[in-house]
């Protein structure tokens, strides 16, 4: 399938929210097209380059995004909220005359749902509190606190983890490894917070 591509300095996971403020003409046109056609666009982490202006090189694995809300900001910019749906691998890409990149992609298999192992049960309480604190961005999304992959992905989105490591997590189908990473990062965050007290 062919999709318009949006290279960003962020890693989007299936089920995760993506707030955007759009100002470049090529992306305003892309969002308008996606809204009219109820179509998705592909989000890829930038490997080299910038979000605006000249073309950036990206990683090959990304996530399709579906627009769920949009508004016109007081500054005239278009505000959009999208949700990640399916992981994909980029097979080829070409740049259109308007500067928009369009890619041929193959969808990667959805993860097999895995019940959250008992040892990670305490994570659900922490995650629920964090998502409630984050407010609007997470209040309308579906919540699957018993799903190991969903819990791991939400933590990886919001914890201070390097983008390259987040990308590796997106590419990995190993839910157990992602949960272990989350536990390690949470321990470090707690230790740092206690050291600062």
Image (spheres, grey):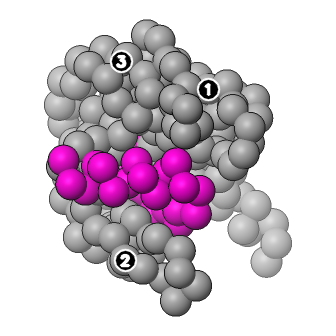
Quarter holding the C terminus is bottom right
Disc number at residue 58? 1
- Whether residue 119 is visible: no
Q: Residue at x 52, y 19 (%)?
A: 94
Numbered disc 2: secondary structure = strand
x then y, percent, for residue 10: 58, 45
Horizontal placement of 77 versus 16: left or right?
right
- Foreground mark, 1 or 2? 2
Disc number at residue 71? 2
Q: Residue at x 49, y 51 (%)?
A: 27
| Residue 33 shown in magenta | yes
Report the front residue among 181 and 28: 28
Give the Cα distance between marks 1 and 2.
Answer: 28 Å
Numbered disc 3: secondary structure = strand
**Location of mark 3 (residue):** 105
Q: Which residues are magenta?
A: 13-37
Disc number at residue 88? none
Give the Cα distance between marks 3 and 2.
Answer: 29 Å
Q: Where 64 sits versus 36, above or below?
A: above
Q: Residue 166's quadrant in the figure? A: top right
Q: Earlier in the sequence, mark 3 or mark 2?
A: 2
x then y, percent, for residue 159: 57, 54
| Residue 123 shown in magenta | no
Numbered disc 1: secondary structure = strand
x then y, percent, for residue 115: 18, 36
Quarter holding the N terminus is top left
């Amino acid at each position: 399938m062919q999709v318009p591509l949006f290279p960003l300095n962020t890693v989007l996971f299936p089920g995760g929210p993506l707030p955007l403020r759009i100002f470049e003409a090529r992306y305003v046109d892309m969002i308008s097209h996606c809204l009219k056609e109820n179509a998705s666009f592909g989000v890829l982490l930038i490997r080299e380059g910038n979000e605006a202006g000249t073309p950036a090189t990206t990683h090959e694995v990304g996530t399709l995004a579906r627009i769920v809300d949009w508004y016109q900001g007081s500054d005239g910019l278009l505000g959009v909220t999208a949700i990640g749906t399916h992981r994909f691998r980029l097979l080829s890409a070409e740049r259109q005359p308007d500067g928009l990149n369009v890619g041929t992609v193959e969808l990667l298999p959805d993860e097999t749902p895995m019940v959250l192992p008992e040892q990670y049960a305490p994570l659900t309480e922490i995650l629920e509190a964090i998502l409630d604190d984050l407010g609007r961005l997470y209040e309308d999304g579906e919540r699957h606190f018993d799903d190991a992959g969903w819990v791991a992905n939400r933590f990886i989105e919001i914890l201070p983890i390097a983008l390259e490591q987040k990308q590796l997590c997106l590419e990995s189908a190993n839910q157990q490894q992602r949960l272990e990473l989350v536990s390690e990062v949470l321990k470090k965050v707690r230790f740092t917070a206690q050291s600062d007290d």
